[in-house]
């Protein structure tokens, strides 16, 4: 009588972890290379002591540089914390920011216009949130510098517009018809401060602004 035996075989799975070699030569790797060089040198032709001193000096300099980098990283983190704490103090304050957007509130709005040079003709084109032009404000000639333009919240037909966020575009030319560089500013109240990827953003009216957009704090 022939008996067939069937055995269960289980395959052992071995998981190996491959460590990716570093592409940077740190102080530990430098020291290992130096020790390996000493262990494998020819006894009949020992390494030049001057070269040994140079290598040890290089090792010392490398270690000092790495320690300095670590110290600078710590100082940077500390300064960032201080800077963030100072930025929080902006909450609730009114700031002037460089932006084409401004708010119409209670039927009136002030738009800041900065001219790089004297302009013979300055025109403000105001658009609503959908991008539709609602009115055009002709300001005539203006000198170089900062100006505050007040808008009564009426469209080109004299209709009162709803409060909200509007956008202004400035066109300015000199006496020769050449374009004059113009930027617009508006005053906002800071609702909150957000820290994102090392960048400080101030929030106002659902919009975000960077600190370099702030021209004035009041």
Image: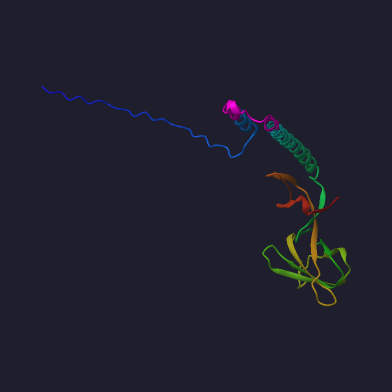
Q: Main secondary structure of the magenta part?
A: helix
Comparing 181 with 195, the one in front is 181
Q: Which residue is pictured at 88% across the width and 66% down the height?
A: 144
Residue drawn at (79%, 63%) of the image: 183
Place of residue 134 in the rendered image (x, y in percent of width and height, measured from the top left):
73, 69
Q: Residue furthest front?
A: 44
Residue farthest toward the top in the current orientation of the protein:
1
Q: Indicate whether residue 158 is drawn in magenta.
A: no
Residue placed furthest toward the left? 1
Q: Tell me what residue is drawn at x 17 percent, y 25 percent.
A: 4
Residue 118 lies, in percent from the top left, at: 87, 70
Q: Nearer the viewer, residue 71 or 75?
A: 71
Q: How many marks?
A: 0
Q: Quadrant of residue 14?
A: top left
Residue 72 sits in which quadrant? Answer: top right
Query: In this orientation, does residue 106 appear?
Result: no
Residue range highlighted in magenta: 36-53
Position above or below: 10 against 192: above
Which image quadrant: the N terminus? top left
Determine if the magenta segment contains residue 43.
Answer: yes
Given residues 206 and 73, the one toward you in this image is: 73
Tell me: 203 left or right of 146. Answer: left
Q: Is residue 94 visible?
A: yes
């Amino acid at each position: 009588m022939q008996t067939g035996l069937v055995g269960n075989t289980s395959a052992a799975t071995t998981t190996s972890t491959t460590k990716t070699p570093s592409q940077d030569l740190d102080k530990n790797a430098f020291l290992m290379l130096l020790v390996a060089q000493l262990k494998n040198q020819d006894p009949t032709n020992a390494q030049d002591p001057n070269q040994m001193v140079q290598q040890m000096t290089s090792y010392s300099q490398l270690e000092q540089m790495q320690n300095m980098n670590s110290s600078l990283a710590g100082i940077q983190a500390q300064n960032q914390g201080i800077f963030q704490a100072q930025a929080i103090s902006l909450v609730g304050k009114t700031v002037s920011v460089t932006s084409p957007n401004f708010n119409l509130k209670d039927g009136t709005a002030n738009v800041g216009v900065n001219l790089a040079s004297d302009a013979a003709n300055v025109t403000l084109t105001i658009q609503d949130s959908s991008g539709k032009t609602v009115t055009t404000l002709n300001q005539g000639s203006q000198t170089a510098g900062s100006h505050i333009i007040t808008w009564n919240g009426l469209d080109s037909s004299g209709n009162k517009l709803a409060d909200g966020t509007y956008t202004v575009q400035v066109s300015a030319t000199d006496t020769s018809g050449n374009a004059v560089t113009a930027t617009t500013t508006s005053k906002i109240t800071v609702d909150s401060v957000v820290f994102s990827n090392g960048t400080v953003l101030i929030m106002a009216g659902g919009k975000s602004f960077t600190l370099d957009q702030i021209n004035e704090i009041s």
